[in-house]
């Protein structure tokens, strides 16, 4: 079931970003930023990769592309307020780019304020043209298919393409647990949050991994079709805007799946916000998703209330 769900959405995940109109949408090449704290996950290179990693700016934020080797960047909570909980943060971008600032670093920094350590996962990506303008001219993503439409055979091949990304997520969980004492993390209180394609990766990891065992999950404007619930039944937080162009048809089956399994689930369906709102400040109620998520973490005992 999950294979059909995910493969039917992969073609739709890409670089739609519902951002403030004042921000330039033109992609501009930038130098690779300093990532002194990034830790290599040791999962090897992206199979068949020949194009080197590159970075660009867009919408007032920065993006990574053609990631060949995965890394994990720790953002540790202040020990004075740390709860012992941790979150792996998986940015989105259609498995061909990573919105690593808006859906990664800024999310991690915000989590730290609630006493939660965060680890931004720079997972391997499918290869795209080395030339930025050629990349920018790629066809836009198509809207999500009707939830009743069966996945086409060609999309089964796409499912195989995220195998390396799942390996990266598995390695991230293993690395945090191996360093749990040094980082002040409880190995049984590690969750995962993903955005768009990162949300697909989050759910794929929870469903297919034999070792990740996330303590909680967050699916932020990701796939919402029905799927099998992991045996450990982790609490699930979901946020989506009703005007999301990639999910304008969905049956919200994931909510039913969790409820029917007796697993905790919270779903926020915002009237406006588009796709890719992340940490962008917008004049829509979708901007409040992070505070709602933090309050949800507090309710489940993973975060501390703000003073």
Image (cartoon, rainbow, N blue to C red):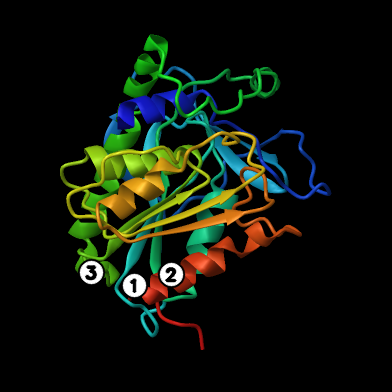
Depth check, front residue: 241 or 262: 262
- Whether residue 83 can be seen here: yes
Mark 2 or 3, nearer chain start? 3
Crowding near the residue tagged with mark 3, few <14, some 14–19, many ≥20 C-alpha atoms within 10 Å: some
Say which residue label 1 marks: 300
Q: Position of residue 19 (x, y in %)?
A: 72, 47
Say which residue label 3 marks: 186
Relative side of 59 to 127, left or right? right
Q: Position of residue 76 (x, y in %)?
A: 39, 68
Q: CA distance from mark 2 to mark 1?
A: 6 Å
Q: Secondary structure at mark 1?
A: loop
Q: Residue at x 47, y 30 (%)?
A: 95
Say which residue label 2 marks: 296
Q: Residue at x 59, y 40 (%)?
A: 63
Q: CA distance from mark 3 to mark 1?
A: 15 Å
Residue 229 is labelled as none
Q: CA distance from mark 2 to mark 3?
A: 19 Å
């Amino acid at each position: 079931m999950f294979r059909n769900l995910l493969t039917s959405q992969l073609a739709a995940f890409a670089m739609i970003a519902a951002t403030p109109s004042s921000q330039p949408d033109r992609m501009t090449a930038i130098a690779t930023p300093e990532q002194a704290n990034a830790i290599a996950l040791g999962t090897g290179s992206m199979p068949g990769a020949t194009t080197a990693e590159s970075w660009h700016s867009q919408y007032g934020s920065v993006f990574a592309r053609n990631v060949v080797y995965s890394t994990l960047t720790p953002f540790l909570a202040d020990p004075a307020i740390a709860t012992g909980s941790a979150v792996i943060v998986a940015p989105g971008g259609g498995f061909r780019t990573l919105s690593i600032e808006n859906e990664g670093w800024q999310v991690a920094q915000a989590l730290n304020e609630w006493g939660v350590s965060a680890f931004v996962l720079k997972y391997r990506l499918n290869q795209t043209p080395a030339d930025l303008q050629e990349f920018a001219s790629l066809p836009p993503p198509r809207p999500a298919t009707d939830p009743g439409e069966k996945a086409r055979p060609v999309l089964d091949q796409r499912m195989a393409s995220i195998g390396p990304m799942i390996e990266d997520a598995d390695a991230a969980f293993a690395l945090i647990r191996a360093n749990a004492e040094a980082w002040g993390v409880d190995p049984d209180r590690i969750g995962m949050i993903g955005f768009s394609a990162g949300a697909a990766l989050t759910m794929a990891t929870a469903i297919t991994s034999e070792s990740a065992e996330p303590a909680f999950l967050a699916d932020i404007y990701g796939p919402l079709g029905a799927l099998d619930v992991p045996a450990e039944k982790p609490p699930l937080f979901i946020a989506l805007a009703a005007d999301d162009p990639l999910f304008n048809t969905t049956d919200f089956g994931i909510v039913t799946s969790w409820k029917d399994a007796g697993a905790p689930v919270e779903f926020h369906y915002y009237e406006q916000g588009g796709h890719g709102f992340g940490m962008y400040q917008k004049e829509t109620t979708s901007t409040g998703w992070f505070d709602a998520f933090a309050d949800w973490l507090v309710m489940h005992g993973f975060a501390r209330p703000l003073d």
